[in-house]
Image (cartoon, rainbow, N blue to C red):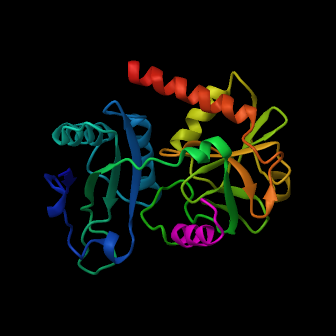
Amino acid sequence: MKIYYVDGKFIPSDQAMIPVSDLAVLRGYGVCDIMRTYKGKPYFLNEHINRLDNSAKEIGLALPWSPKKMMDIVLETLKRNQLVDEVNIRIVITGGSSSDFFYPQGHPRLIILITDMKKLPDIWYEKGVKVITHLSERTLPDAKVTSYIPAAMALKKAKKKDAIESIYINRKMEVLEGTTSNLFAFFNSTLVTPKDGVLKGITRQAILSISNSLFKIEERVIKLEQLLKADEVFISGTNKCVVPVVQIDDTKISTGTPGKNTQKIIEALERHTVEFINS
């Protein structure tokens, strides 16, 4: 049985609970983040914790824990689980209990959940995937919040159309990001990704960093009509890594097969992972 950290205590997963008066339950007020391990080591731990800390600031949630303290708790939680297989580390900071069921009282709760990694289908990476577009924009794009109702609705729509992800577009018909992924496109040999109105994913940042010596990079607006004419498209995320996109809605992207530049990025990210494991 997994051991979780909940509000100052390490407890078995089947005993994990928080009061129903918590604002995360009542109002969906809270922030979260997720990372994964490689060889038992949390990947991009500093970056995920710092983003979590920034997310809390974005929604006005004052934290009593420093980033260093939260990192220490994550590492201790991993240690207590004595893991063999790779796992996800899900961190949630709630708004805490509220006497008026609305206004934060200054006592947030920190929750760390250790969950099994779900292996994604090999065919996603070998043949590419289909995604759809969905009209939606994040209210606070710089904060990874616990409320995922828009994302859940968008993913439900995607599944009905045999797609694995929904890509948000705004009212200007500019593409933004996926429900749980960032979006990239190649136009010739230039790698382009939306700059504004998106959650800056940790994997996104890693891709931009490792691609800097491989391709010309632009962070800018991408219109939907431009995206549909891209030479290559892919999405990225903590668990997905890099997934080639070969169809958007009813439009085939280029040849309808994963592109060579996308493969270069997949290989570069794999090398980065190996370096991390061996560090």
Name the quadrant containing residue 134: bottom right
Can you see residue 217? no
Q: Give the answer, above or below, for where 153 lies relative to 255.
A: below
Secondary structure predominantly adopted by residues drawn in magenta: helix
Range drawn in magenta? 150-164
Q: Quadrant of the C terminus?
A: top left
Q: State the residue lying farthest toward the bottom.
A: 100
Give the side of residue 152 with respect to residue 162, left or right: left
Name the quadrant containing residue 37: top left
Residue 151 locus on image (x, y percent)? 54, 66
Q: Nearer the viewer, residue 87 or 17?
A: 87
Q: Is residue 163 magenta?
A: yes
Q: Give the answer, above or below, for where 26 lies relative to 208.
A: below
Give the side of residue 12 with respect to residue 207, left or right: left
**What residue sits 77% from the left and 50% below the top?**
221
**What residue sits 54% from the left and 53% below the top?**
142
Q: Is residue 136 magenta?
A: no
Q: Nearer the viewer, residue 257 or 104?
A: 257
Residue 171 locus on image (x, y percent)? 75, 69
Q: Give the answer, above or below, for where 161 lies relative to 118.
A: below
Residue 20 locus on image (x, y percent)? 24, 76
Residue 273 locus on image (x, y percent)? 48, 27
Name the quadrant containing residue 130: bottom right
**What residue sits 19% from the left and 42% below the top?**
81
Q: Nearer the viewer, residue 179 or 156?
A: 156
**What residue sits 49% from the left and 72% below the top?**
149
State how many labels appear.
Answer: 0
Can you see residue 273? yes
